Amino acid sequence: LDLGLEMALLKNRVHVGFNFFKSHAYDLLLNSNISSVYGSYDYYENNGEIDTYGEEAFIRVNPIHTKNWDIVLGANIAVANSEVKSLGDARSMTIDYTGYNNDDAQMIMSVGGAPYEFYGYKTKGVFRSSVEAQAAGLVNSSGDAYRAGDIHFVDTNEDGIINEQDKVRLGSSMPDFYGGFNLSARYKKFALDANFAYSVGAKVYNATRRQMESMDNFYNQSTAALNRWQVEGQQTSMPRANYGDPLGNNLFSDRWIESGDYLKLRSVKLTYSFDKL
């Protein structure tokens, strides 16, 4: 479904428009689990369904239109929301990230939710002191207690153990809204055209920064590691260096999720029109 309304006003000096759209995607290819007696643990089948709906509005203004000058300004904004309607027999499923080796990053899809949301742990900074760490009373899945300088993970189910049951949705790569704006200006035979694009609200996973700030091996690290926790009472967002990461400070969490907002100059063009020869 795609419905639109466009209007030209003030002798075509102003154009405005609005669109509403909705789409239904079905037969999406998903990974399903089966018994190993069939020779494999999983297989692919076309059983996914996703609905997407949204709105878009635009405006184009031509405030100056003379023999020597012509200026046109335009902008648009769009919002698109997707909802998972079916995952076959499953209500939810996790998808492993396929980036760096041994990367535990995951995405999750659930019926009624948005597709491809990041799925991991939430954090509350770094334990500044031993007293603060002991007061939290948290242990990892192996029973090791978190100490000063370790990441303070959020114990979402409040059982005192940081494990798989504490994972939550960390945001989606889909923006809240996006669009662009453009400028077209002419003076006699010179013309300038510029086109911009923007996006707001999307989340991205910075796997490169995760490698460069892990401090759990002998690989080269970024200068951000200079701000790591080193002494009691130190306030920092960078945990202590710990070879092998036995406490799991580098687990996939919102520590590695960043804002995907951007404003981008997509193209710019300056032209001159010569007289015909």
Image (cartoon, helix red, strand yellow):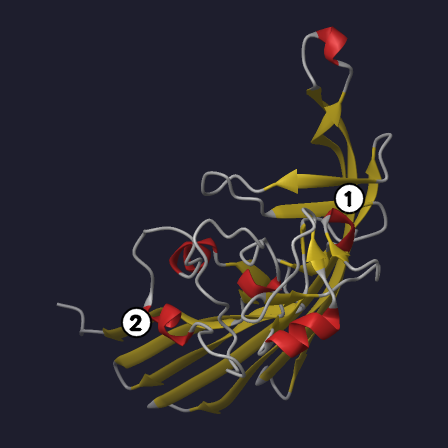
| Kind of residue sitting beneath label 1 | Ile
The amino acid at mark 2 is: Lys
Residue 175 visible to the viewer: yes
**Residue 236 image offset from top left, x and y in percent:** 50, 79
Query: Relative to 87, does residue 57 appear above or below in the rendering?
Result: below
**Crowd around label 1: few <14 · some 14–19 · many ≥20 (10 Å):** many
Quadrant for the C terminus, please.
bottom left
Residue 26 relative to residue 95: left or right = right
Task: Name the residue beneath numbered marker 1.
Answer: 50
Quadrant in the picture for residue 175: bottom right
Q: Secondary structure at mark 1?
A: strand
| Residue 78, position as x, y percentages in the image | 66, 68
Q: Earlier in the sequence, mark 1 or mark 2?
A: 1
In the drawing, what numbered circle is on residue 170?
A: none
Answer above or below: position of 41 versus 276: above
The answer, for residue 5, to whether it is visible in the render is no
Horizontal and vertical percent for residue 85? 84, 43
Local SS, label 2: strand
* Quarter-of-image position of residue 111: top right
Residue 165 location in percent, x, y?
78, 50
Q: Seen in the image, is 203 located left or right of residue 242?
A: right
Which residue carries the number 2 mark?
A: 269
Q: Residue at x 50, y 52 (%)?
A: 245
Name the residue at 75% across, 61% down: 54
Q: Is residue 87 above or below residue 35?
A: below
